[in-house]
Amino acid sequence: MKRQALHDELLKRLKEKRRFLQVLAGPRQVGKTTLARQVMQASKLPAHYASADEPSLRHRTWIEQQWDLARLKAKENKAGALLVLDEVQKV
């Protein structure tokens, strides 16, 4: 699937009434993070981005903390908020 098509599909899914977990998976260095950040910006939703690249962050509580931060943003906006966890597989 071409990059623009992926971008458009993710945006479409974020605009659905029921939003589900979306996973961007693929080989290293193909632009997953860039695509996620572009979709965050284009969605116009309040967003929280966090990366688990830091070795000291590899604990389950880190995910809970990020969830709570995004939840605070969602409470401020009727449309919700977007949480992007980059490199989450490292946790």
Image (cartoon, grey):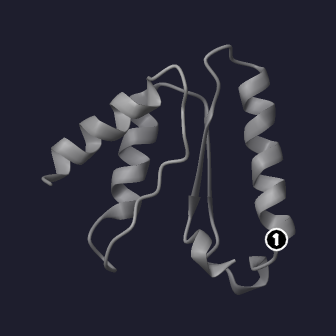
Question: Which residue is most to the bottom?
Answer: 55
Question: Who's the residue at 79% across and 44% down the image?
Answer: 69
Q: Position of residue 9 (x, y in %)?
A: 28, 38
Q: Position of residue 17 (x, y in %)?
A: 52, 19
Q: Tell me the residue at 45%/31% (across/down).
A: 14
**Furthest residue toward top:** 78
Dot 1 corresponds to which residue?
60
Considering the numbered disc 1 on the image, is that residue within a helix, a strand or a loop? helix
3 or 49: nearer the viewer: 3
Q: Is residue 91 above or below residue 46?
A: below
Residue at 61 percent across and 69 percent down: it is 88
User: Where residue 70 appears, x then y in whole percent?
Assistant: 73, 40
| In the image: residue 30, left or right of residue 91 | left
Classify residue 74 as left or right of residue 32: right
The answer to whether residue 10 is above or below residue 44 is below
In front of the other: 72 or 13: 13
Q: Amino acid at mark 1?
A: Arg
Q: Position of residue 52 (x, y in %)?
A: 64, 72
Residue 58 to residue 83: above or below: below
Q: Quadrant of residue 5?
A: top left
Q: Total number of numbered labels?
A: 1
Q: For the N terminus, give its image quadrant.
A: bottom left
80 vs 20, left or right, is right
Residue at left offset 81%, top offset 77%: 59
Neighbor class of circle 1 (other Cα within 10 Å; few <14, some 14-19, many 20+) is: few
Q: Nearer the viewer, residue 88 or 35?
A: 88
Figure quadrant of the C terminus:
bottom right
